[in-house]
Image (spheres, helix red, strand yellow):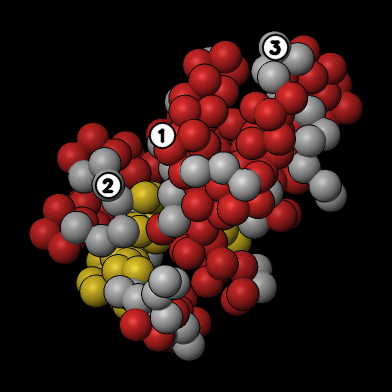
Amino acid sequence: MTTDVADATPVRVVLADDEAMIRAGVRAILATDPRIEVVAEAGDGRVAVELVRAHRPRVALLDIRMPKLDGLSAAAEIGRLVPQTAAVMLTTFGEDDHIARALGHGASGFLLKSGDPRELIAGVHAVADGGAYLSPRVARRVIELGGGRLARRPVARDRTAALTDREREVLALVGAGLSNAEIARRLHLVEGTVKTYLTSIFTRLEVRNRVQAAIIAYEAGLVAQ
């Protein structure tokens, strides 16, 4: 029996941005979806970490630039202290250095403050379900960092060549932002099998998380544009 969406437990979110107007806008967008609940807000990264420790939300939406503790450092601390909380970075287009650094901090997603509001809601649900989510504009920019997409494609294809056909299918769906459950349904697998494939994929590609794997999927041309 499937669970009615209306009866499902809302995705609990901690929102952190040092600009009150931005927080209000993001909160208003999330409030349009009854399946999302903002449980606390912070104006700096240090308070954000403490609120995540107190509330144990499924998702932490973190501005990259914040006082006391920036969003990247906050994401790293959250990953260490509350690993069940997925960190999603809120960014403005063009923050290339920050985006590149965030890949190594365990972030599960990147969302543009100026992006389509639907991307914000989709991103929260994707990472809450165990997936990775990159705003399309951010994804395109990230894969261009360090030499351009065309220059990086042969390297990415070489890295994915070691994967089995099924592992490449799973990786492509990770790149498309699907959760483990969605991948399982798409490929007619049980969710535990998907997790086993992901463990193998991460090991073979030598990546730490789904976002890094998703970037390789984009670079290798596995994700439809």
- Which quadrant: the N terminus? bottom left
Under mark 3, the amino acid is: Ala
| Residue at x 76%, y 31% (from the top left corner) | 219
Which sits in the foreground, 173 or 186? 186
Q: Position of residue 39 (x, y in %)?
A: 24, 74
Measured along the vertical axis of the image, is residue 151 above or below residue 97? above
Task: Indicate which disc residue 28 carries.
Answer: none
Q: Residues within 10 Å of mark 3 (few under 14, many from 20)?
A: few
Q: Residue at x 61, y 68 (%)?
A: 119
Residue at 44%, 49% in the rendered image:
130
The mark lying in front, picked from 1 and 3, is: 3
Whether residue 6 sits left or right of residue 207 in the image: it is left
Are the residues tagged 2 and 1 within 8 Å (C-beta)?
Answer: no
Question: Badge 2 is on which residue?
Answer: 84
Disc 2 versus disc 1: distance between alpha carbons? 15 Å
* Amino acid at circle 2: Gln
- The CA distance from mark 1 to mark 3 is 26 Å
**Residue 151 visible in this rendered orientation of the protein:** yes
